[in-house]
């Protein structure tokens, strides 16, 4: 729970600090690519050290899903940060 909240706060800070509108589609694509790569790496590690295709494979899928969720939370934070930046500058 705390880790997801930290990712959200970091996304808000990133969206607020970066000047102007962010290329949110670019962030989504980059985050998805990084998530897929990390999911594959962690999946291989889990398969090697987790005892083959048993619990190690299920753990790899879980890790991949968690990485995808964290990427989505980060992007939501960037949206919120952009929104806050626009509102603060209009005031």
Image (cartoon, rainbow, N blue to C red):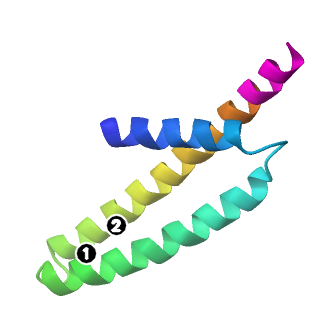
Q: Give the quarter of the figure containing the C terminus.
A: top right
Neighbours of disc 1 within 10 Å: few (<14), some (14-19), many (20+): some
Residue 7 position, x and y percent, is 46, 44
Neighbours of disc 2 within 10 Å: few (<14), some (14-19), many (20+): some
Question: Residue, x 51% and y 72% (percent of image)?
Answer: 36
Separation (CA) of disc 1 from disc 2: 6 Å
| Foreground pick, 61 / 34 | 34
- Residue 1 in view: no
Please give the residue where the numbered disc 1 appears in the rendered image.
57
| Magenta segment, prevailing SS (helix, strand or loop) | helix
Q: Is residue 66 left or right of residue 22?
A: left
Please give the residue where the numbered disc 2 appears in the rendered image.
61
Q: Residue placed farthest to the top in the image?
A: 91
Q: Secondary structure at mark 2?
A: helix
Q: Is residue 65 above or below residue 77?
A: below
Q: Which residues are magenta?
A: 84-91
Q: Is residue 52 above or below residue 79?
A: below
- Residue 64 in view: yes
| Foreground pick, 44 / 21 | 21
Residue 66 occupies quadrant: bottom left
């Amino acid at each position: 729970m705390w880790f997801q909240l930290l990712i959200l706060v970091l996304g808000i800070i990133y969206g607020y600090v970066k000047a102007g509108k962010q290329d949110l589609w670019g962030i989504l694509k980059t985050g998805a690519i990084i998530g897929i790569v990390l999911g594959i790496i962690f999946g291989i590690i889990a398969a090697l050290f987790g005892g083959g295709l048993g619990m190690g494979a299920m753990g790899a899928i879980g890790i991949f899903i968690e990485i995808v969720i964290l990427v989505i939370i980060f992007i939501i934070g960037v949206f919120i940060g952009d929104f806050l930046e626009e509102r603060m500058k209009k005031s």
